[in-house]
Amino acid sequence: MSILIDAKSRIMVQGITGRRGRFHSERMLNNNSPLVGGTSPGKGGDWAFNGRIPVFDTVKDCVDATNADVSVLFVPPHATVDCILEAIEAGIKTIISVTGSVPVQDMMQVKSALRKSDSVLIGPNSPGILVPEIANAGIFPDHIVGAGDVALVSRSGTLSYEVLDILNEAGIGVSVAIGIGDDPIIGMDFKFFLELLESDPHTEQIVLVGGPGGESELVAANYIMESITKPVVAYVVGENLKASIMGSVFSRNSNFFLNSVERKTNAFIEAGALLAKNIEDIPCLLRR
Amino acid sequence: MKLHEYQAKSLFRQAGIPVPASMLATNAVQVKRIASEIGYPVVLKAQILEQGRGKAGGVRLIQHEHEAEQIANEIFKLEINHQTVQSILIEKAFTFNKEYYLGIFSDLDLGSPVLRLSEAGGATCLEKDSFLNARMAERQIDIDQGLHRYQVRQLLTNGDVDPSLWKQFGSIALKLYDIYRSNDATLAEINSLVVTQQNQLYALDAKINIDSLSLFRHESFLDSIDPTYYGWLEHQARKYGVTYHQFTGELGCIVNGMGLAYLTYDQIISMNSIPAAIIDIHGGSTVSSMTSSLELLFQNDSIRAVLINIYGGMTNCEEIAEGILSVTAKARHKKPIFLRLKGTNDISAIETLSGLKQLQIFDSTHELVKAAVDYLKDS
């Protein structure tokens, strides 16, 4: 048991016959994640992976036949809005968009649809959810970390691997690892996951990994102060962006506001979280 | 991605937003000829994407023909933050009574467009205080519903805008929203929107930023990306599907994902060094994005060493290794490569790289960055 994904979850993959979808679905099968089906329009009726997994034309067909309640998307960016809206309409509870770089106005349409539904969207540009020994709904590298009682919630995918690797080296396991997504507009924010983790019996401590740009970390810090009783270790990457005018190079290529890192680290300190100055410091700030 | 004023105004004109008569020129002789056609007085406006062109002297009023060439030449000589002026927009000069600001922007945290109206417009509005002190009204727009006239009216009735202008405001706001939507803009603003003596609204300036993630469906904008502003290397990298961040040091870096880019950058800076470049090959990158990125760094003579920091989730480490092997096999310059390669299929990937003499492999970002920075300091 964990938040959002557990042994009873029924995972499907949208784009199961594409290059990435096939590769990572096979990994999910090999690590015993509860994968039950997938979609690939035009290939409905086929079976993938030596007849182990049925392929459907639509998400609705897949849900009707398999009772899938989690969908992981491996589709091109231009098709993402279409696939998320299809999953919402088919009643998928947890939608994970591994696909990233989704156009901003497409995501605005998705946000509008999410407000009117009960579905939860993780991502875009998310590595998914990893519950060690139970399920890897997404693209987390295999065997990266063992089971434990620390939850990781990270904005960046690659930094979530980096942190899991560091935790693993220190002999610390996790209850769940979640990449909330690193696109300009994402579905659920840090606060949403903190709320779930606070009441998750398998989580004793929380590691939050943020970055420059946006307000999500500030909202999270405020929420930690008001409502989170479990210990939180926070790390925000990008501290040197302010120290150097070279930071402006990043800002020209992306929509990030560079002064935001210091504001965020200060907010976490004020909220009573333990701030990791360096990413390597995270394990020694966790209670043993 | 920012559009030039003349590009934005052309979209305004097509949509029916009133703009002054204007034409573009690329040399002073042309400026003079066009100014005579339009009729004096005219305003010359440097077409430059850097902010602060007004303060730098990039916007000049010309009353008489005899000034035109000289002032145009002065503008062409301007340099704002290393950017030079490639073209000048010649525009019919206006007298006006009042300036407003009208804009639509993408609020990423809300996940919605926001319409903003301010009673302070023009250059002064860029000075934050006067902008914030002025009456300003905002309204979130539901993208499913679109923008409607009553929503614009609600903003207007809370302010001091004369009711005789409400209808024009409404039309312009709706047209601006159409431009914002149909071009995948992240910003579409009129600053300033002026009221002429005939009580007509005109867009004196136009600013449109396009969502760079949407360019696959707006191919015409790809041709209008200004490489003098966005950088030639950045421009080239974009064609390979990777993102190039240029700096001034000697260490060329390749990473997958922005988080790892920031972490690598943070650690290089904290070791008192500066990268030459950080190329983000993004998640799920292929052999070709790796080879193109590595070639870009190898071709650059100011780069003395290459750092590759990959933690593959979606990215298959075997494809990264294949990319490294194919470039090092044919590269004439044997720059040292410092590599950290972990994640999906890392063990077999590292095996294929054994025996590559210019390569050193590390286990963590910290060890990797330290070794590369030490190498540059010692040699």
Image: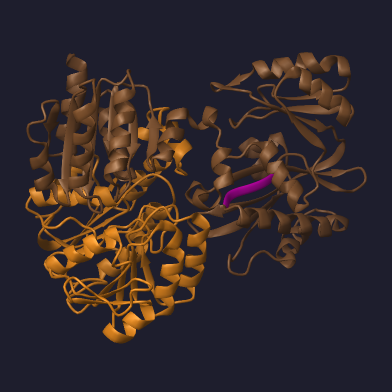
Chain colours: A orange, B brown
Residue A145 in which image quadrant: bottom left
The stretch in magenta equals B185-190
Q: Is residue A192 above or below residue B215?
A: below
Res. B120 visible in picture: yes
Residue in front for this viewpoint, A165 or B229:
B229
Residue B310 in which image quadrant: top left
Residue A31 in which image quadrant: bottom left
Name which residue lies at 24% across and 63% down.
A22
Q: Could you tell whether A54 is left or right of B221 in the image?
A: left
Which percent across, then down, holds residue B73? Answer: 72, 15
Q: Is residue B44 above or below residue A78?
A: above
Name which residue lies at 15% across and 39% down.
B364
Name which residue lies at 17% across and 70% down.
A33
Q: Is residue B170 above or below residue B316?
A: below
Which percent across, then down, holds residue B67? Answer: 83, 15
Which percent across, then down, holds residue A42? Answer: 37, 73
Give the residue at the far bottom of this rendering.
A64
Residue in front for this viewpoint, A114 or B162:
A114
Residue B375 lies in the magenta-colored region: no
Which percent across, then down, holds residue A25? Answer: 22, 66
Residue in front for this viewpoint, B124 or B312:
B312
Q: Quadrant of the N terminus of chain A?
A: bottom left
Q: Quadrant of the C terminus of chain A?
A: bottom left
Q: Is residue B335 above or below residue B209?
A: above
Mark count: 0
Name which residue lies at 54% across and 42% down.
B222
**Magenta: main secondary structure:** strand
